[in-house]
Amino acid sequence: MGDILQISNNPWLLSIAAVILLAIVWIVVRLVRGRDGDFERAVADISFDRIDGLVIPKADEGEILVDYLLLTSQGLLILELKDVQGTVFGGDKLQDWTVINKQRRYTFSNPQPALYDRIAAVRQIVREVPVAGRILFLDGAEFAKGTPGLVSTLAQLVSEFGEPDKKAAKFKIEAFKPHWELIRKEALSTQSP
């Protein structure tokens, strides 16, 4: 208790403590923003339009939430974002995937079946447009036994869906625009009472 009183009575030590605290806050903010910035840059590189938090009718019944739907030169791309740190033990046929990191061990359901449902729901609306889906793991996730299907990193996503020829891409995008507007309209009608 006496040490705390000495710091609070000493403006010089108080200033140093404040600078250290600000530095820690700045580092944490930079780390969080850097990861978000990488995601935003990758999405901007591959997409010409995007819808976040899209709710549409499910292929069989009910509604389904699509985290991110992107209009790319290859068609529509559904992204499901996973922010996982550590070693991931997952596979196409496994029901649960396990993450092990320094702090803990936990499991989550294989995200692929839910992504297949999202792809089917979007295809039901835009039948004539290619629809793909990827489960995007941000930096910090390592797959111990190989990467399962439909799983991607930011670099792989840009490599697979990037379009170096922007003029050719705009021509392709124009062909997809009516279908893109159709899915926007469907989303609006789902959200209206």
Image (cartoon, rainbow, N blue to C red):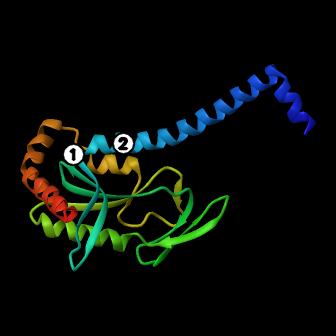
Which residue occupies 12% across, 46% down?
173
Nearer to us in this view, 149 or 55 = 55
Farthest-out residue, top:
12
Quadrant where the N terminus sits is top right
Secondary structure at badge 2 equals helix
Expressed as whole percent of the image width and height from the top left, the position of residue 59 reads: 21, 75
Expressed as whole percent of the image width and height from the top left, the position of residue 179 reads: 10, 57
Farthest-out residue, right:
2
Which residue occupies 10% across, 58% down?
182
Expressed as whole percent of the image width and height from the top left, the position of residue 86 reads: 58, 58
Q: Bin the neighbour count of mark 2 within 10 Å (Cα to Cα): few under 14, some 14-19, many 20 and up.
A: few
Image-based side of 17 in relation to 156, left or right = right
In this view, 32 is above or below 51: above
Secondary structure at badge 1 equals strand
Q: Which residue is mark 2?
A: 40
In this view, 123 is above or below 23: below
- Tell me if label 2 and label 1 are in contact, CB under 8 Å: no
Residue 31 found in image quarter: top right
* Disc on res. 120: none
Image-based side of 177 in relation to 1, left or right = left
Nearer to us in this view, 74 or 5 = 5
Nearer to us in this view, 11 or 25 = 11
Expressed as whole percent of the image width and height from the top left, the position of residue 61 reads: 23, 79
Which residue occupies 17% across, 67% down?
123
The amino acid type found where label 2 is placed reads Glu
Quadrant where the C terminus sits is bottom left
Earlier sequence position, callout 2 versus callout 1:
2
Q: Which residue is mark 1?
A: 49
Mark 2–mark 1 Cα distance, whole angstroms, equals 12 Å
The amino acid type found where label 1 is placed reads Asp
